[in-house]
Amino acid sequence: MADKLKRIDGRKSNELRPMTAKVGVVPNADGSAMFAFGNTIAIAAVYGPRLLHPQHMQNPATGILRCNYDLLSFSVNDRKKPGPSRRSQEISKMTEWALLPVLDLKEFPNTVIDVQIYIIQADAGTRTAGINAASLALAHAGIPMKNLVCSVAIGKQDKDIVTDLTKAEEDFEGGEGPTDFPLAKEANTNEFTLIQLDGKIPPERVKDVIEFANQACDEIYEVQKKALKEVVEQ
Ligand code: UDP
């Protein structure tokens, strides 16, 4: 099918922004990675497993995962007030939920694994870039994982489904209005670990969103694997 859609940056409807991934970017962390979709850049650093304090929060059956997402003040044009917000708390929580299904933390009772995710430059898709970086950082830290997690936001421009929206696309108010569908899945499977929806979409179009997400996640997985291989082969 010919792609007649005109996107602001000239991409095809199913085309991701150029991706960059690098593992081992924070030497003092137990594991770390950066992941970028175009102008959106996320850094993730993993610390742990470490004994969890206060003690009453410890779980003798398993370690726990604690993610902290932060959009840095000068990562956006309108300086963002520093510190936590409802938005950052929500994103931190859903990042944990997106990653937990691939982790096996039973080997680390009473401990916590901290994942710090910093968005150093933002042009939409920060939560998904953060999940991709965190997945790589956890693998780099040697945490037992059954798979990598790949994440992307699929959206709608009027009636067209599009992959990996920029901020300008997210803000597009024409036609049926903006729709943003962040997803995460276990690589090479049909197991989605996160599906969010901001906006409206007819239920019969959700299968198109899933198809676009599957294709994008296959490409993201290749970039993640390459970044991990680069540190293993060093
Ligand atoms: N954004 C901003 N200031 C904020 C929060 C967000 O400028 O305080 C921008 C930023 O570019 C972000 C985009 O709005 O990437 C979309 O934010 P959203 O909450 O939809 O999450 P994201 O798409 O980044 O996962």
Image: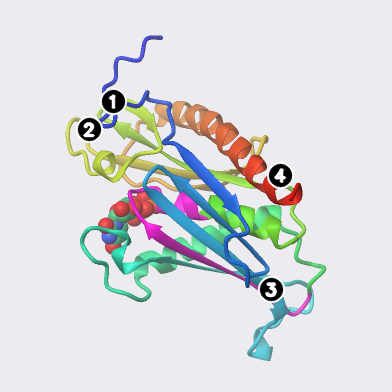
Instruction: Give the labeled residue for mark 2.
Output: 176
Q: Which residue is mark 3?
A: 48
The Cα atoms of the two marked residues, 1 and 4, are separated by: 39 Å
Callouts 4 and 3 close, C-beta under 8 Å: no
Number of other residues with Cα within 10 Å of mark 4, as a class: few under 14, some 14 to 19, many 20 or more: few
At a point 43% along the width and 53% down the height, the residue shown is 41
Q: Earlier in the sequence, mark 2 or mark 3?
A: 3
Residue 45: percent from left, percent from top: 58, 66
Q: Secondary structure at mark 2?
A: loop
Q: Secondary structure at mark 3?
A: strand
The residue pinned by badge 4 equals: 229
Q: Is residue 50 above or below residue 46?
A: below
* Residue at mark 4 to residue at mark 3: CA–CA distance: 22 Å
Front position in the image: 38 or 14: 38
Q: How much space separates mark 1 and mark 3, taking CA atoms?
A: 45 Å
Q: Which mark is residue 159?
A: 1
Q: Residue at x 27, y 67 (%)?
A: 80
Give the mark, 4 or 3, whose residue is nearer the N terminus. 3
Between the residue at mark 2 and the residue at mark 3, the CA separation in whole angstroms equals 45 Å
Q: Position of residue 56 (x, y in %)?
A: 67, 89
Q: Which amino acid lies under the numbered mark 3 shown in the image of this protein?
A: Gly
Left or right: residue 58 compared with residue 128: right
Contact check, label 1 and label 3, Cβ < 8 Å: no
- Which of pointers 2 and 1 lies earlier in the amino acid sequence? 1
> Which of the two discs, 1 and 3, labels the residue nearer the N terminus?
3
Image: 154 above or below 79:
above
